[in-house]
Amino acid sequence: MKNIAFALILLSSVNVFARSTSSASDVKSTLSEAHKKFKDLKDGKNADYIPALKKVPSELFGIALVTVDGKVYTAGDIDKQFSIQSISKVFTLSHVLQESGEKQITDTVGVDATGDVFNSIVAVEKNKGHEMNPLVNPGAIATTSMVKGKNADEIWNKIINVHSAFAGRPLEVNQEVYKSESETNQRNQAIGKLMEAYEIIKTNPEQATDLYTRQCSINVNAKDLATMAATLANGGLNPVTRTKVIDQKHVKGVLAVMSTAGLYDNTGQWLFKTGLPAKSGVGGGVIAIVPGKFGIAAFSPRLDDAGNSVRAQRAIEYITEKLKANPYDIQPRGEYVIGKDER
Ligand code: GLN
């Protein structure tokens, strides 16, 4: 009897493994299908509160997937560069965890979801600058202010270097977007000041907001973003360049904050559908991480009301479902024992 039970357990674990293993041609065709399926979706609109983002062609649509063993799959507009925007928050957070440890974040901006829009001032007021997280603007501007350096240049070099290491190539700032957002970021400047008033920002808030604006203007393509996501999926080691970007011990914290706050006030809906830690940006990019397996990114400029790319979300949802990548989508193990209560 014992042997039969053991055999059943073994059998079911083989099935679980088979379920999660997709061949290269499955992955390639799934990406192409997703592109085809959603390329004509016209819902949403480009971000317009940053004038330069209004001008980005709305029809652009690219998808990329990078596995933890460094294989790259793509579909659509893959070389087109766009500004990383809020997705940068993930990588500056990663740097601060690496440089100063997790208490630097948990004791200051915290790791709780606000449930409010990404640039909410009410959220700051309600929580006196605490109990938010590094993926909404107040927490993100404060997180940028925590990057150590003698002057703005030294801090900026660390920020651009960590982004480049995640992407596996030297990244640059989109100067047009940086200028455009710098001219219109009065709200973020106010948030920076408020975070100083609550003594979370302890350095110069104008400098922190400027560096934050610059990090949001970093240019990436969908493949860069997928490589950045795959580096997190691979425990901090870039699977394409094989270089360690952050210590493995910090990755789980980054993924936890992405799971609760990566798509702002729509994160619950997203997690319900995909089960994946993810992050969006108003430039139209979205990344998602399947821990231990792959990183995925999609880009298309039209956004929903929460500021998340409509096509990118649909594409990633579709691919996650097709590749059976939702970690909460569990196959029961073993067989039920006859005679036990059944429901
Ligand atoms: N730079 C943008 C801002 O601060 C980023 C917002 C976003 O991508 N959600 O408003």
Image (tube, grey):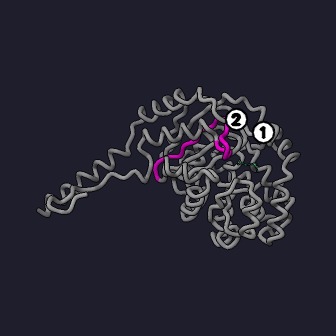
Which range of residues does the magenta coloring cover? 292-308
Q: In this rendering, is residue 329 above or below 3?
A: above
Q: Is residue 252 visible?
A: yes
Specify the label residue 165 is tagged with: none
Q: In this rendering, is residue 339 above or below 103?
A: above
For the N terminus, the quadrant is: bottom left
- In the image, taking residue 139 as reference, residue 334 lies left or right, namely left
- In the image, taking residue 207 as reference, residue 118 lies left or right, namely left
- Percent across and percent down for residue 63 are 57, 35
Q: Which residue has dot 1 on it? A: 48
Q: Is mark 2 within 8 Å of ligand 1?
A: no
> For this rendering, which residue is in front, 105 or 69?
105
Q: Quadrant of residue 302?
A: top right
- In the image, taking residue 96 as reference, residue 67 lies left or right, namely left
Q: Is residue 242 visible?
A: no
Q: Secondary structure at mark 2?
A: loop
For the C terminus, the quadrant is: bottom left
> Number of labelled discs?
2
Q: Are there few (<14), some (14-19), or many (20+) residues within 10 Å of tag 1?
A: few
Q: Which residue has dot 2 on it? A: 45
At x 59%, y 56%, the residue is 258
- In the image, taking residue 240 as reference, residue 343 lies left or right, namely left
Q: Secondary structure at mark 1?
A: loop
- Percent across and percent down for residue 32 are 50, 29
At x 44%, y 49%, the residue is 326
Disc 1 residue type (three-letter): Asp
At x 72%, y 62%, the residue is 123
